[in-house]
Image: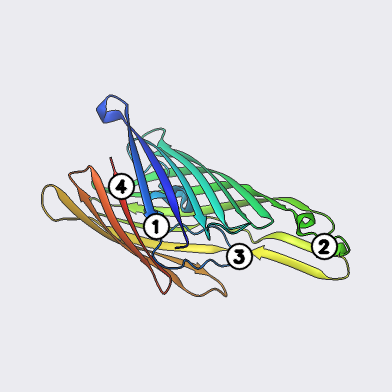
Amino acid sequence: MEGGSYLIFIKNNKMNNYKLYFFSIIYVSMWSIQSYAQQDVTFTMYNYNMNIINPAYAGTGETLEFTSNFRTQWQGLDGAPKTQSFSLSSPTSEKVGLGLSITNSSVFVLNETDIFADFSYKLKLDETLDLFLGLKAGGAFVNINLADIGLDNDPLFSENVSVFNPNVGIGAYLKGKNFFVNMSAPALLRTKRYEKKSGIVTHATDKMQFFVGAGYHVPLNKDITFTPSFLTRLISDVPFSMDISGMLNVYDLVDLGLSYRLKESIIHWCFLK
């Protein structure tokens, strides 16, 4: 077993006297989850982390939404990958939504904290069709503790690296009565995480990622709705990646879901209101 993730979702419902509803999800990987070196964190449960990958999602709901996620992999190994994320989004007016996301990831001697603010604007296309356009701005604080490797006699690893990489992103989110479509590029700038010039040049870069996804809500009866969805993740020189998910909403109280990442993993979850 690779590891697990724990997610808390809090929603402020104005339609219900501003009471807070607390949701919890525990899901466990059944197969290995492959990650691509030096790329941003991939969220398997993307429907609950949409604010992080698409700035247009901010304000698409009717209420304040807060999401917290914790993920570990390869438990028991020193320097194993760990990720914590927090995101907040809310409509601030009839057409404007704002969001904030913070993601911290660490593996071995690398630690990165991404902080981004989101802005979205709603265009009313039809009575039941809205198009949200979003902008994301912020950056990544990258720290690489090369000295901790212990190669004291190698000048390449004699000092640590600490940099800030600013970035911007764009996104679009089309929301209909029973469907949604999203497209986004959360980081448009190609940034460098590490580069040394001491006889040997070593560097790692982040390449632009492009997300495309959609979903459709299928009412099975008055109490149960089935939502199939998918999300593709495109990166140059990296194999094609797609998540295919199916979710059952029961009495608007419980979400039961299953997600398959092509050739990589199967994830299942239970989301309780």
Q: Residues within 10 Å of mark 4 (few under 14, many from 20)?
A: many
Secondary structure at badge 2 equals loop
Can you identify the residue that label 3 sits on? Answer: 207
Instruction: Say the numbered circle drawn on residue 137.
Output: none
- Asked whether the residues under the numbered discs 4 and 3 touch, taking CB atoms below 8 Å apart as contact, a structural biologist would say no
Disc on the earlier residue, 4 or 3? 3
Instruction: Say the numbered circle drawn on residue 151.
Output: 2
Instruction: State which mark lies toward you, 3 or 1.
Output: 1
Instruction: Say the numbered circle drawn on residue 28.
Output: 1
Q: CA distance from mark 2 to mark 3?
A: 29 Å
Q: Is residue 234 left or right of residue 223?
A: right
Disc on the earlier residue, 1 or 4? 1
Residue 135 % position (x, y): 51, 48
Q: CA distance from mark 3 to mark 1?
A: 29 Å
Residue 198 % position (x, y): 87, 66
Can you identify the residue that label 4 sits on? Answer: 271
Disc on the earlier residue, 4 or 2? 2
Residue shown at 41%/61% (left/top)? 29
Is 68 drawn above or below residue 21 in the view shown? below
Which quadrant is the C terminus positioned in?
top left
Q: CA distance from mark 4 to mark 3?
A: 33 Å
Instruction: State which mark lies toward you, 4 or 3.
Output: 4
Q: CA distance from mark 2 to mark 1?
A: 37 Å
Amino acid carrying label 1: it is Val
